[in-house]
Amino acid sequence: MVKLFKFSYIIIIGLIIISCGSNQEKHTEQDVNIIPPSKGLVETVLTKEEQDALTPDEVIQALKDGNNRFISNDLTSRDHSAQIRKSTLAQYPKAIVLSCVDSRVPVEDVFDRGIGDLFVARVAGNFVNEDILGSMEFACKVSGSKLILVMGHEHCGAVKAAIDNVKLGNITPMLSKIRPAVDKVEYSGDRTSKNQEFVHMVAESNVMSTIDQIRLKSPILKEMEENGEIRIVGGLYDMDNGVVTFIKGRL
């Protein structure tokens, strides 16, 4: 009798284990089925044909649209692994953006762009020198980009340092590239970095000065702009809300 009881007990336990395993299997399958697939996941990168078909004005609008998605917290979902693989052998970016090095200005995110969409050059105070001009010429003349955007930003430390005429190591000659933008601003109020109105005016002046320098020092880019192959424009990034305002007079 005892043996029969033990045998029956073992059978019952075994059935319970099998049942639990079966239920677990069904539960796992159900969990897999209820997980929605990713929608709108971008895997492609820009092709040469797509780049060739773009106009400079279309690229400007694409950046504006991307910035709207950025400030709305509606960034595009991208398969970066797939984009890396598909851009291994070639790249055909829409534009080159010259930005400040400031870590609070994530250029690709600001315009909701992915791998292969933008060339990005960065230097404190977003000014140009021979190296950056060469990079811009490569981006536009060699690689086919349709736009140069010089993007400054509010509360720029480099601009504030140039206003206050800071002297410190290699920062001193660097700020000398920005200082002309300070002198160009006609303003009768407080001309120090404590005055946010003046800092804003200098930041905008610096963007415009950089655009003038591009046209003056790069005959290649100047000619491309005159022929309508590219546009050279400016913008200011607002630290408070993430909005990029394209500066009037260049659009």
Image: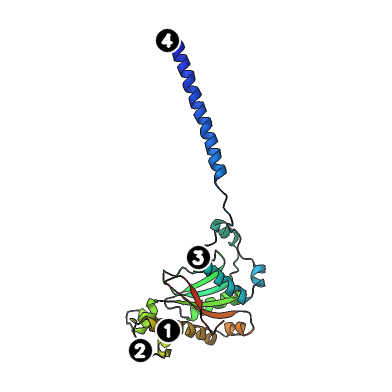
Q: Dividing the image into 4 quarters, which one contains the N terminus?
A: top left
Residue at (55% x, 56% y) in the render: 81
Q: Which of 157 and 185 is in front in this view?
A: 185
Quick check: can you spot residue 175?
A: no
Determine the CA span between mark 4 and mark 3.
72 Å
Badge 1 marks a residue whose secondary structure is: helix
| Disc 1: CA contacts within 10 A as few (<14), some (14-19) or many (>=20) | some
Q: Mark 3 points at which residue?
A: 72
Q: What element does badge 2 sit on?
A: loop
Residue pointed to by mark 4:
2
The residues tagged by marks 1 and 3 sit, at their Cα atoms, a distance apart of 27 Å
User: What amino acid is labelled 3 in the image?
Assistant: Ser
Q: Distance between the residues labelled 2 and 3?
A: 36 Å
Local crowd at mark 4 within 10 Å, few (<14), some, or many (≥20)?
A: few
Q: Residue furthest front?
A: 72
Count neighbours of disc 2 (C-alpha within 10 A) and say few if under 14, some if 14 to 19, many if 20 or more.
Answer: few
Whole-percent x, y for residue 250 in the image: 55, 83
Coordinates of residue 175 in the picture (x, y in percent):
39, 82
- Give the numbered dot on residue 201: 1
Does residue 78 lie above or below 131 as drawn?
above
Residue on which the image places disc 2: 189
Residue 171 in which image quadrant: bottom left
Q: What residue type is labelled 4?
A: Val
- N-terminal of the pair, mark 4 or mark 3, is 4
State how far apart marks 4 and 1 are (Cα). 96 Å
